[in-house]
Image (tube, rainbow, N blue to C red):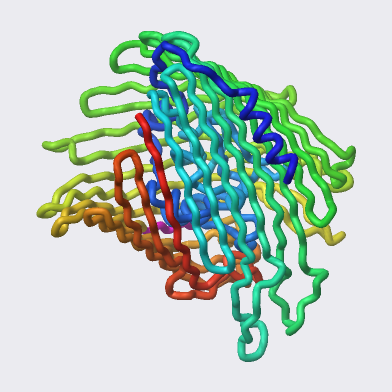
Amino acid sequence: MRRFYTAILFFMSILAYGQMDTTMLSDVDLWAVQVQGSEGALNLQLDSSMQVGYFRLSESISAELPIYVKSYGPSAVATFSVRGTGAQHTEVLWNGMSVNSPMLGLFDLNLVSPSAFDQIDFIYGGASLPSGVSSFGGALNLSNEPRSSEHFQLRLLQVLGSYKTNHTEFDLSASNGAIFWRTKLLWDYSLNDFEYTNPRLTDSPTFVNEHAEVNQNQWIQEAGVRLNSNNTVMARLWLQQSNRQIPGLMSIYPNTSAMDQSTQNDVQQRVQAEWTSSGESMESQVRAGFSSWAINFDEDESVAQTWQGQWRTQFSLDSLTEVETLLQYIQEQGDVEAYPNGESKRSRYAAALSVNRRWEYLRGEFHAKQERIQGDWAPFQYQLGIKATYGAKKQWGTRFRTATQVRYPTLNDLFWGVDGQLNLSPEKSFQNEISQELEFNIVAATMESRITGFTNHVENYILWLPQSDLTWRATNIDLVEILGAEVDLSGTMPIFAGKLNVGTSYSYTQSRDQQGHQLIFIPLHQARLHSSYSLRKFTFSLNFVFQGSVYTDRENEFYMPWYQTADLRCSYKWYWGKHQVAAFVQSANVTDVHYQTIPLRPMPGRTFQIGAQWRLNVQ
């Protein structure tokens, strides 16, 4: 811990700066440009209130997106799957660069607080190709956006909650118009000693969730300089340290053994440096990044590293046509005793192209990507997307996209075990999606509706299966067919002196192998409701999530029942000159539902949190 804070002081001291007279122009975020221009896929942005009231990324995105979060408990690993794909098929990016582990191909959502970022976007399937990744499910981008205008801003947040939960944030941002500086510090602690019932025992007795303490620290540092009117350099640092106790599984015996309990310590470091150059008709951005993971699980250590380099450009051929390009290099390395040689390395090269063209009632896009991995050329990948807008007020919209993507096995897929599985084939995805949109008014309400149908044909799907020697290995299971539909309805209307926002969605996802079995942890049915009412300085919100039952074995003989949760929240804001003070109280799982997302791993019942935030903003 002492090294962690020493590093903070050292980094802050070497980046101290003086005053300059030039003016800093707005920075160009080429990832944001690509997301906003992607008409062939759906782009979702989390409600800003979700970034404060929820302290884990898994909680905030599950309330907004049609996903299934697979969590081993509040103190353990949490991953998510989208539209019938696996957790390994969804990429998490930080400012446009992947932060998924090269060994697992996953990202742990429980290690991240959404309030650490300024914007969170999700983009489905093949629309992620221009970002340089091949994620069948999609890409979740966590971005930190520099505030370039002259300002000084200080924000403090303190939250207390059930099970000795303590969440603290310190956020300092300043700019003189030429140099930008921002420091974010986050501390999280929870004992997680909630009560749960064990239905495996007679009369379903109640137990206390023991050995589930979690302690996390995060530091995000940003510093940028405007060299001249067209060039900006930016450096970012993201350090994470967590110590987690993982409780044992629910047992058929009244007294569980301490041998079932585990401890995991994580240290993750990420560094980014970028240079952005902008002109009248072209923007160029060069990025370099490094990520490392050091994990100690019950004294078993594993280390992974990733080096990344990107060169992005965006330019206009004419007033209606935009072109984006990407050249990318990634070096991956994993070091763990389970690999035959103790470590493994892999190099990846990629080139991507994106073309967007607008007409009066039509917009078209074409994304393409070519990748070379360890000296082998990957199959060509592409997405074609079209959106037509029509009607007297252009209130109707029809979207269509078709895409082909390829995903190569992770380092663990290839090298885990005595001999590894070097003969694994890459997964191939063939996707189609069509949606119908309508904007309309009902009395004073402004409404938006969308109906979407999608298919995904995945060949050589990789699944970890038990072997005769009691070990687990990655295996290609030939074919998975995904068929689904989503219905979304949202609206805004004034009520009395306030404003009501309501959004609801339902999704149906069928994801089956060649034997007709639904893949594990893929619910057929999901539904969500998000509503908020703002009246003067008060905001009241309700979030409801329904998750259908999921199978837990490949033959569909065992399943976990459906469950629903509801969260309530009330917040109040008031202003005093340059000061803003906010307070909130909320209850998660207000109906006190006992549920699990993974067998024998209980989740908390009803919880309460209160919080206060103070912000000083000097322009």
Residue 303, compared with residue 543, is above or below; it is above
Pick the quarter of the image with the C terminus.
top left
Residue 557 appears in which quarter of the rendering? bottom right
Q: How many marks?
A: 0
Which residue is rendered at x = 64% and y = 62% of the image?
72
Which residue is rendered at x = 26% and y = 50% of the image?
449
Which residue is rendered at x = 62% and y = 67% of the image?
192
Residue 53, compared with residue 350, is above or below; it is below
Q: Position of residue 508 (x, y in %)?
A: 42, 58
Q: Nearer the viewer, residue 552 or 142?
A: 142
Q: Position of residue 402 (x, y in %)?
A: 43, 36
Residue 16, compared with residue 522, is above or below; it is above
Which residue is rendered at x = 14% and y = 59% of the image?
496
Residue 390 lies in the magenta-colored region? no
- Span shown in magenta: 506-510
Q: Residue furthest front?
A: 577
Residue 149 appears in which quarter of the rendering? top left
Q: Position of residue 511 (x, y in %)?
A: 53, 55
| Magenta span: chief secondary structure | strand
Q: Residue furthest bottom?
A: 203
Horizontally, is 298 left or right of 137 in the view?
right
Horizontally, is 479 left or right of 118 in the view?
right
Q: Nearer the viewer, residue 317 or 604?
A: 604
Is residue 490 visible in the rendered structure shown here? yes
Is residue 350 visible in the rendered structure shown here? no
Q: Position of residue 159 (x, y in %)?
A: 50, 57
Q: Nearer the viewer, residue 8 or 37?
A: 8
